[in-house]
Amino acid sequence: MRIPDIIIAVDGYSSTGKSSFAKIIANEFSFLYLDSGALYRGVTLFAIENGYIDADGSIDVPGLDKALGGLDLHFGEKGTYIGDRCIEREIRSLAVADKVSPIATVPQVREFVDKKLREFGKFKRVVMDGRDIGTTVFPDAELKIFMTADPMVRARRRAEEMHTKGEEADISEVLKNLQERDWIDSHRETSPLAKAEDAIVLDNSDMTMEDQMKWLRNIIAERFCCA
Ligand code: CDP
C-alpha cells in the first residue's frame, strides 16, 4: 500500500500496545518509529540515579531542571541511550514505571522531551507513540489514533511481556501501576493524556495485531485514497 508523507500519532492509555502497533506500522510503510515514552523513562532513570526524585516521589524540580541542560539523552542503534550507555533495559523496569508519571508532570521535563521529538517531525514519514503526540507535540499530524483497552487485558499483556524478558511481574502490581499512571497522566496540568478531537479511537481489547492492521489499512485507504 502506498502512503503519502504524513505523521501518524498514536496516543492512549498505558500498556494498550501503542508501541507494538506503531512499530508494525513503521515497518509496513517504511516510516521512522519513535517511542516518546522512552525519553520520559530515560529522564526518570536519570532522576532516580542522581537523586532528583526520592523514594516517596518528591522531586527536586530546580535541581532536575538545571541538570537537564547536561543530559545527553538520545535514540541509538539499540534503543535509548544516555551518552554511550544503552539504558533500554533499565527504563522498562517497574522501578522506573513507578516514578515516570510524576516526572512527566514536570513542565521543564516535557519541554526538554518535546524539543527532541519535534526535531523528527521535519522528516515526515514518522509514527510516534505517547500520550500527547496528537494534542501537543504534533497537533497537525495527518493521522491520529487514540488507543484504549480493558485494564485487565492490558495488565495481562504487560505482565506477559515482562515475563518473556525474564523480569518478575506480579499482575496485580502491574495493574495498579498502569491505573496509577493513567490517573496521573490524565489529570496533570501540562499536556494531559487526552484524545485529540480529530483522533480515531481504537479499542483493541478483543483484537489481534492483524485485526488492527486491517482496521488501519481501511482508514488509510479511505482518508488518503491510495491503493
Ligand atoms: O508503554 P507504556 O504505555 O507503559 O508507557 P510509555 O509510552 O513507555 O510511557 C511511560 C510514561 O511516560 C507514561 O505513563 C507517561 O507518564 C509518560 N509519557 C508522557 O507523559 N507523554 C508522552 N508523550 C509519552 C509518555
Image (cartoon, helix red, strand yellow):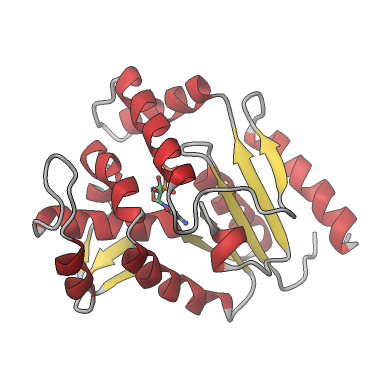
Return the x and y of residue 195 as percentages of the image width and height: 63, 48
Residue pictured at 63% horizontal, 36% vertical: 209
Compared across the picture, whether 119 is left or right of 208 comes to left
Query: In this orientation, does residue 169 appear?
Result: yes
Return the x and y of residue 27 as percentages of the image width and height: 60, 57
Residue pictured at 65% horizontal, 23% vertical: 206
How many labels, in total? 0
Return the x and y of residue 183 as percentages of the image width and height: 43, 36
Compared across the picture, whether 111 is left or right of 12 comes to left
Q: Quadrant of residue 224?
A: bottom right
Quadrant where the C terminus is found in the figure: bottom right
Quadrant where the N terminus is found in the figure: bottom right
Return the x and y of residue 77 as percentages of the image width and height: 35, 66
Pick the residue in front: 179 or 39: 179
Residue pictured at 14% horizontal, 58% vertical: 52
Pick the residue in front: 194 or 146: 194
Residue pictured at 30% horizontal, 35% vertical: 165
Compared across the picture, whether 143 is left or right of 218 comes to left
Q: Quadrant of residue 174?
A: top left
Pick the residue in front: 124 or 30: 124
Residue lying furthest front: 189
Query: In this orientation, does residue 75 appear?
Result: no
Compared across the picture, whether 226 is left or right of 205 comes to right
